Image (tube, grey):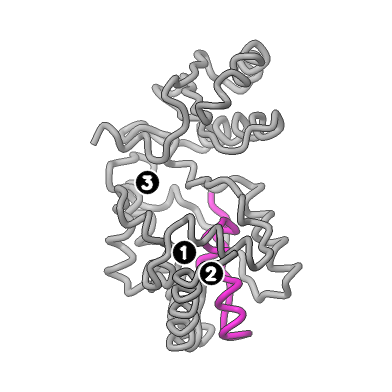
Amino acid sequence: MVTEELQKKQDHLEAYLKQLGSVVLAFSGGVDSTYLMHEARKVLGDRAMAVTMNLASVPEREVADAIEYCRREGIRQEVVKMDQFGIEGFAENPSNRCYLCKHFLFSSLKKIAEKEGFAYVIDGTNLNDASQYRPGLKALGELGIRSPLRHAGLYKADIRALSKEAGLPTWSKPSFACMATRFPYGETITEDKLSMVEKAEDFLFSKGFKQFRVRLHEGNLARIEVLPEDLWKLFRIHEEVVRTFHSLGFAYVTMDLQGYRMGSMDEVL
């Protein structure tokens, strides 16, 4: 059940979207962007358009989910394939990589919005994001990208609760950030390494794990983060995990005893 306070936040969100008039949403198909797309469609109808970036750092299953949601709901969507390795500095993976990438990608989204006659580009940033290391937020600010969820004072837990109330399939979906976050800053990102990580995470999905990360170190060491309560489950199948990861190109396979935590690569900063 949605509380009175949460209902006020949703009302504020809808009023803000109405004020924007027409929007292009950076749509990943995750918890935040799906709820925001649902609300934008409710308020703006066809004046809300989804653009999904097909990128090397985004798992194919996530792109497929985003396409299927828009198809099922009859939402206008454009899927844009872009070469992240053409972004200066992306492969070198500096500590401001997210800024470089976001600036390039959202500049492209602004061009799409202008071409299609939409007034604003919006994204699914929420208040939790604002409290973490997010250099990409600087790029959004510089480009004038609007973040309605943050504007309405919504946290991730709020968005999940409102998504559940609305019957959205993503209300309990795990959070999965860009796969570039699986690499320590300074570790060169390549297509082969991204493919290794994606296949390793696909394998863990197939084994029933929901919230986790496979971090890659020194090109061939996997550090697996799962929820603390799932550590025993991972250890029970550790021989199969090691065999599979070795077949993908990892020389060493490790289990992080601290368990899954968002932004663990930022802990060294």
Magenta segment: 26-55
The secondary element bearing badge 2 is classed as helix
At x 49%, y 72%, the residue is 4
- Which numbered dot is residue 36? 2
Closest to the observer, 122 or 91: 122
Q: From the viewer's perspective, is residue 143 above or below residue 57?
A: below
Residue 49 included in the magenta stretch of the image: yes
Q: Are marks 2 and 1 in contact (CB under 8 Å)?
A: yes
Amino acid at the residue labelled 1: Gly
- Quadrant assignment for the N terminus: bottom right
- Cα separation, mark 2 vs mark 1, equals 7 Å
At x 48%, y 80%, the residue is 11
Q: Are there few (<14), some (14-19), or many (20+) residues within 10 Å of tag 1? A: many
Q: Which residue carries the number 1 mark?
A: 124
- Which numbered dot is residue 56? none
Q: Residue 237 appears at what percent x and percent y?
A: 66, 16
Closer to the camera: disc 2 or disc 3? 2
Query: Where is residue 50, by image quadrant?
Result: bottom right
- Quadrant assignment for the C terminus: top left
Residue 71 included in the magenta stretch of the image: no
Q: Residue 82 appears at what percent x and percent y?
A: 52, 57
Q: Which residue carries the number 3 mark?
A: 90
Query: Where is residue 9, by image quadrant?
Result: bottom left
Q: Residue 77 appears at what percent x and percent y?
A: 63, 71
Q: Are there few (<14), some (14-19), or many (20+) residues within 10 Å of tag 2? A: many
Q: From the viewer's perspective, is residue 77 above or below residue 218?
A: below
Q: Is residue 138 rendered to the left or right of residue 204?
A: left
Q: Is residue 255 rendered to the left or right of residue 217?
A: right
Amino acid at the residue labelled 3: Phe
Amino acid at the residue labelled 2: Leu
